[in-house]
Amino acid sequence: LNVFLIYFACLFPGCCHSLNYETNSDVLKLVVMGDWGGLPFYPYYSPFEYATSKHLMNVAVGGNYHAVLALGDNFYFNGVTDEYDSRFQNTFENVFNNQAFETIPWFVLGGNHDHYGNITGQLEYTKHSSRWHYPALWYKLQLSGIGFNITVIMIDTVTLCGNTVYDGAQPKGTDDHEAAESQLSFIEDSLKQTTDSYVIVAGHFPVWSVAEHGPTECLLQKLKPLLEKYKATAYMCGHDHNLQHIREANSTVDYFVSGAVDVVTPSMKHKDAVPANSLQFYWGNLLGLGGFATVDATKDEMMLKYHSATGSVLYSYAMKPRI
């Protein structure tokens, strides 16, 4: 079943906001990266983004990866003006330009910097790029391998919690309570209905973080109880410009931060704001020139790895199927 055909069927008003991507593989492979949005002036990418993109493409092409999850802050500092903005070419197409990598689909969500601009322009760019898939502010993606499936619930944390007034602040509260409640219902229904082996919820703001922004109070109140109740495998996000793994005692949910493509910020400002002994891994090394995550899933386990742009595998962690 072709991901593109299902995608276009879902563009019509009131439709499903759901994509299916079937493979004939016994290993499903994803790249997970946030905060990759370049610069709003020439050359329109940062040294970190450039270095990270080169290693990321080598890993993805060499490892036959199936898809990229792009976790927001796609265009610094104020998003795009519309679907024809030159930033799509200068920060995205021209940077991630390995010919083989261009066949790998990107599944996109929005961050706070994207919402500072015209977020609808990013949705509409789906019509102009064969690899950019952003059908709605929140949507569900089912990836099918041989003998197992992964559900990925792509959410919009700005709609849910509001935007930040300035970088470093907590979200100020939603501007659209009806949309926020609709999204929460979508998240809960998706979690409740899935029987897939692995369930990833992906957003921009972190639930837990030890770094510059810290935990997001709104998500602790609204999202975390759903993740725990329905036994999601993991929550993956960006926003903080480093790599983190947090897991609470007596919890089945792993919390990952992968926001280190465009810049690395070696902050542990909120190390005391997470539960005791919950921080499993942290990386914020400026000399590493950026970082990203990969996920390799089989019917037996889902392995997350953190990579630095300099070529090191920094961390590996295996998660078991839910069922």
Image: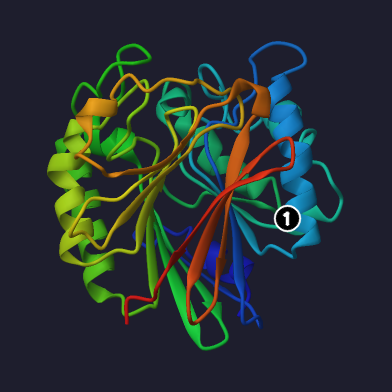
Horizontal side, residue 228 vs residue 120: left or right: left
The kind of residue tagged 1 is Ala
- Kindly tell me whether residue 265 is visible in this rendering: yes
In this rendered view, identify the residue nearer to me: 323 or 202. 323
Residue 162: name its quadrant.
Answer: top left
| Percent x, y of residue 74 | 56, 32
Instruction: Quickly name the residue at label 1.
Output: 60
The residue most toward the right is 99
Above or below for 197 versus 84? below
Q: Residue at x 52, y 37 (%)?
A: 34
Residue in the image at 28% along x and 38% along y: 208
| Numbered disc 1: secondary structure | helix
Q: Is residue 238 left or right of residue 155?
A: right
Rendered location of residue 46, percent (x, y): 69, 20
The residue depicted at 45 percent of the width and 59 percent of the height is: 12
Q: Which residue is at a point 54% across and 33% down the rendered structure image?
A: 121
Q: 149 or 249, which lies in front?
A: 249
Whether residue 17 sits left or right of residue 323 in the image: it is right
Work out whether residue 253 or residue 262 is closer to the camera in this orientation and state it.
253
Q: Position of residue 150 (x, y in %)?
A: 45, 71
Dot 1 alpha-carbon crowd within 10 angstroms: few under 14, some 14 to 19, many 20 or more:
many
